[in-house]
Image (cartoon, rainbow, N blue to C red):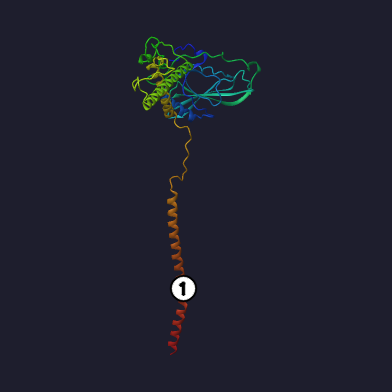
Amino acid sequence: MASQGHPTQADGQCLRYPDPIPPQREINYETAVGMLMRAAGTAQNVPFVWSYVDKPQDGTVLLLYLPLGNPFPNDGIRYQDSEIKAVVPAGGGRELEVCEIKYGFIPGAGEPSSSRLRRRYRLQKGGHPQLVLVHYTRGPMILIPPGIANQPVRAYPLRALNEPSVYVAGEKQGQKMYPPGMGPGAMHAGGGGPASMAPGAMGMPMNFSQQQAMLAQQNSQMEALERRRERERERERAAQRDGQTAGRPPQGRIPDDDDSGDEVDQISTRTLAMARYKRNHEWMNEVFHRAAFGDRAPKPKSTPYSIFSKSELEEKTAKLQTEIEALQASSAKRRADKIRESQSQPSADITMSSIAGDSVAA
């Protein structure tokens, strides 16, 4: 797909996951494996877009599609070190490949030292080996030689991208996704039906800014149409209340002073459908993004005492305390009885002995 001779890969273009990934200060091996496993499923339903990686900020996390054997695209950073590669066991028969390059800086940015660090992760076993997770952070620093401090690593400005997005995994792998109404045959056909979304055909796709401008214009036209219709309904209700319906039927369209008569014709069914498609796509994207990446807020850790009920323990403690007090009282009573018995026993013996002595004397 992308390795089959995309004409502008020398400029640093690459296929990137379209939704932004929250920045991360650090990514450990376990986190990288989890993100790559989730990305393998998400990539089957979400087309990747052609984009540049240019001067990323610290903490930036990117998910790229890089065919095996292709070099990493130019990211606008000059590195004073060579990339180091290592393979780490990831459990379950998986192997995580980690590539690290450090001592990077942005030429001409006035950075006092080169400390930028880039790590990229991919599952060479047990996952999709062409999906690469890239993380930019800071590492050890060294001084920048004056001779290369301002030497650019790529030519600016970057060329505008007009290529359609592409599916990189699953049953749709290799299929192109054109913007609504801009697929193959849209310049000759009157509609944006399934033929305009056929993969592999030649069309005239627009870049992102042009798409946004077109959609903004369509949205403004739809809002103007809704406002005009609302004004018409208000006038009809006012006319019915005031009884000013002579000479025209109570229902129907009341001409507006600033209505040219052909504005409705300019907003075609196709335009309304395209704007509706865009809005529905944004809603569905929020739903699937949540399903793919989940809630990133850390869950509170449960304490080892969470399996016990405080009220139940207090009730049992009170019951045991009552029983202990009853046993202590019973034990004290028995001891008192024994003391009384021991105190009364000698006097009884003396009495008996005296009686026996008297009887002998007699």
Q: Nearer the viewer, residue 219 or 131?
A: 219
Secondary structure category for the residue under label 1: helix
Rendered location of residue 73, percent (x, y): 52, 17
- Which residue sits furthest bottom? 362
Tell me the residue that label 1 is attached to: 340
Viewer-closest of 64 and 240: 240
- Compared to residue 156, the image places residue 297 above or below, namely below
Q: Residue at x 46, y 70 (%)?
A: 336
The residue positioned 46% from the left and 66% from the top of the image is 332
Residue 95 visible within the image: yes
Quadrant where the N terminus is found in the figure: top left
Percent coordinates x, y for residue 35 in the rendering: 46, 27
Is 80 left, or right, of 27 in this rendering? Answer: right
Q: Residues within 10 Å of mark 1 (few under 14, many from 20)?
A: few
Outermost residue, top side: 188
Residue type at mark 1: give it.
Arg
Query: Where in the figure is residue 28, as x and y percent of width and height?
Result: 51, 30
Q: Is residue 342 above or below residue 24?
A: below
Q: How many marks?
A: 1
The image position of residue 244, as x and y in percent, is 37, 24
Residue 126 can be seen in this image: no
